[in-house]
Amino acid sequence: MSANHEDRHQSPASLDRALRLGIGGPVGSGKTALVAALCRTLGPVLRLGVVTNDIYTTEDADFLRRAGVLDPERIVAVQTGCCPHTAIRDDIAANIDAVETLEERFGPLDLVIVESGGDNLTATFSRGLADQQIFVLDVSGGDKVPRKGGPGVTTADLLVVNKTDLAKHVGADLTVMSRDAAAVRDGKPVLFTSIREVPEVYAVAEWVHGVVESWAHARAHHPHGPAVPSTNA
Ligand SMILES: Nc1nc2c(ncn2[C@@H]2O[C@H](COP(=O)(O)OP(=O)(O)OP(=O)(O)O)[C@@H](O)[C@H]2O)c(=O)[nH]1
């Protein structure tokens, strides 16, 4: 990411709003499945909203509405009409509008999840859109993927390696993935999931709950102060 991106999209100064959590990753890695799982597990304890991004359809939002994981009106679809990373990194206006619409209609909210369209390993969210980011990989690309790095793998606040149930079928060694991810992530957390086998995704939900609590704490003490520091230091 160029310095320009960072310069143009500084973190919003006000904490007087919900935490915005970006979920990105390659096509089909399980982003929508993770959003559904987080809504199921955290819906009873947090006030949630969801924004989905698809290029030409509203497929992810439709899936989530059909799954019944959240009040359908709290799920807003953005149609990017362009490369998914453009809408989460370069021209974030449509996503900011969608987040603010949710907060105006249903606020106060604790957490707004913004799911990116499937993209490549370089796709990350502008810090002007997402306060925290999860990058979702799956094992089907092979165990070399964390080693290859890329901004999604190295800079996300949480890396999720999904579809561990498929590891034995594709010859992916989870120990190698864990070791390589740790080596390129400078201590930031990595969690392995099989959303198919454990749909509650307890460990990821616990991490998300933790960052929301940190945000709420900062919001209570400094409502107009600078954005909350990363909890992963
Ligand atoms: N075997 C297995 N399949 C999974 C798992 N998680 C998700 N899937 C399946 O993987 C496929 C893609 O999942 P999605 O959640 O749609 O992936 P996505 O990243 O949102 O996809 P895009 O939005 O198209 O980029 C679906 O058929 C899911 O049912 C898992 O843990 N194990």
Image (cartoon, rainbow, N blue to C red):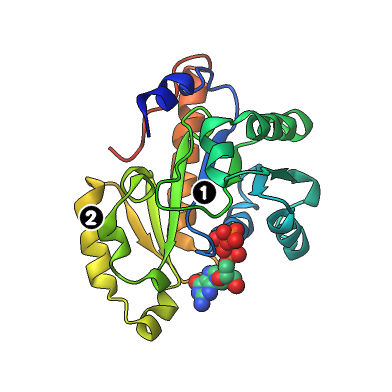
Residue tagged 1? 23
Residue at 75% x, 45% y: name it.
Answer: 74
**Vertical order, 217 against 225 (above or below):** below
Q: Quadrant of residue 196?
A: bottom right
**Vertical order, 180 against 212 (above or below):** below
Residue at 63% x, 55% y: name it.
Answer: 39
Q: Residue furthest front?
A: 82
Amino acid carrying label 1: it is: Ile
Quarter of the image containing the C terminus?
top left
Give the Cα separation between the discs numbered 2 and 1.
20 Å
| Secondary structure found at label 2 | helix
Assign ligand 1 to one image quadrant. bottom right
Residue at 51% x, 52% y: name it.
Answer: 119
Label located before the other in sequence (2 or 1): 1
Q: Residue 48 vs residue 219: left or right? A: right
CA neighbours of label 1 inside 10 A, class few (<14), some (14 to 19), many (20+):
many
Residue tagged 2? 182
